[in-house]
Image (cartoon, grey):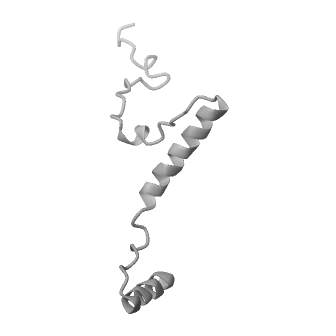
Amino acid sequence: MQQYMLDTFRAAQQGTPAPPAPGTHDWQAVREFRTWRDFLAVVDGRAVRRRGRWRRWFRRPAETPVRPAAGAERGRQKAGC
């Protein structure tokens, strides 16, 4: 942050445009890194793998059937037997 403030001050003194704020292009850098990694995988002859790490956060929860507790069936005997 201090470096950004120094660069902004220097740009104002010299009449040049101010630099972008810190964190402005972080996601772009991440995407470029992924693209570069995919490119290197193709050049090396490996398959490009995109992990579905985020997919599990956005999927609908699967409906799981409710199973009776162990031994619950034995307790349900008819009264006359």
Residue that sits furthest to the front in the current view: 15
Q: Position of residue 27 (x, y in %)?
A: 43, 56
Image point (41%, 38%), residue name: 55
Residue in front for this viewpoint, 49 or 9: 9
Image quarter hosting the C terminus: top left
Q: Position of residue 69 (x, y in %)?
A: 45, 26
Residue in front for this viewpoint, 71 or 54: 54
Residue 28 vertical placement versus 37 (above, below): below
Residue in front for this viewpoint, 21 or 61: 21
Q: Quadrant of residue 77?
A: top left
Residue that sits furthest to the right in the current view: 44
Residue that sits furthest to the bottom in the current view: 13
Image point (43%, 68%), residue name: 23
Image point (51%, 44%), residue name: 35
Residue 2 vertical placement versus 45 (above, below): below
59 left or right, relative to 3: left
Q: Quadrant of residue 14?
A: bottom left
Figure disc tally? 0
Image point (40%, 42%), residue name: 57
Residue 32 vertical placement versus 62 (above, below): below
Q: Position of residue 60 (x, y in %)?
A: 33, 34
Residue 58 vertical placement versus 70 (above, below): below
